[in-house]
Image (cartoon, helix red, strand yellow):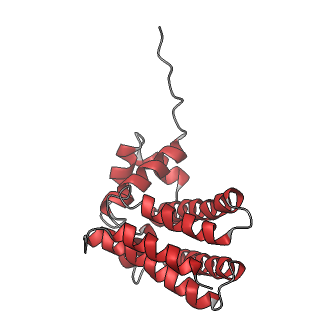
Amino acid sequence: MPRETQPRLPPRERILQAAETLFYQDGINRVTVDAIAERAESTKMTLYRHFASKESLVLAWIGLLIEDYSQVFDQLEVQFPGDPASQILGFGQFIAGNLSGTSRRGCPFTNTLAETTGQYPEIREAIFAHKQRQFYRLVTLCTHAGASQPESQAKEITLMLEGLQVVAQNSGFEGATDYVLGKLTAILRQP
């Protein structure tokens, strides 16, 4: 019986996939263009044909991550129509569910900001804008959930979820995920 073969991804997608894996594992500064090309089973010339620079590759990767996070909110809206508290909890579960998948490296946006201090302003601006949109989306959900102080509640949720990623990264204490999801549930029950 012949094996079914998976179609090989086009070069640009292979390069992005390789970059994502390596950036998560080793950080953007430590990963070389050569390493990305090798992992993508490509060449540096092909990489530069699709991305003018390493910065443009990092920006494309960050753009994909931003899109992924936006899609999570969109999917939660479809999954829990008219139930903003469940949408918020679902986002918390998404963050918690991805902690081990990121090799315990924490938030890719925060890590990228830490690595790009003083350089890559376009990448930093994209991340700042994403984090602000995410916060205001939480404010809107908290408002629709009937929170008496939706902005304050969204700040608390943001700090818990960001903190959860940091604790997962530094192994600060056991049970952080259950603790944060329990606190998030309690917060969402408050008026």
From the top left corner, tell me how far across and down residue 17 is, in percent. Answer: 46, 49
**Residue drawn where x is 63% and y is 64% of the image:** 73
The residue that appears at 51% across and 28% down in the rendered structure is 6
State the image coordinates of residue 14 (x, y, percent, origin top left): 48, 44
Relative to 165, is 61 above or below? Answer: above
63 in relation to 149, above or below: above
Residue 149 occupies quadrant: bottom right
**Image quadrant containing the C terminus:** bottom right
Residue 78: x %, y % from top left: 71, 58
Q: Is residue 124 visible?
A: no
How many labels, in total? 0
State left or right for residue 11 relative to residue 28: right
**Residue occupying the point 32% across, 68% down:** 168
Above or below — where is 24 with respect to 49? below
Q: Position of residue 106 (x, y in %)?
A: 37, 68
Is residue 155 shown left or right of residue 27? right
Farthest-out residue, right: 82
Q: Judge left or right: residue 34 versus residue 88.
A: left
Horizontal side, residue 25 vs residue 93: left or right: left
At 42% across and 73% down in the image, what residue appears? 180
Residue 97 in view, yes or no? yes
Residue at the farthest top position:
1
Q: Nearer the viewer, residue 147 or 155?
A: 147
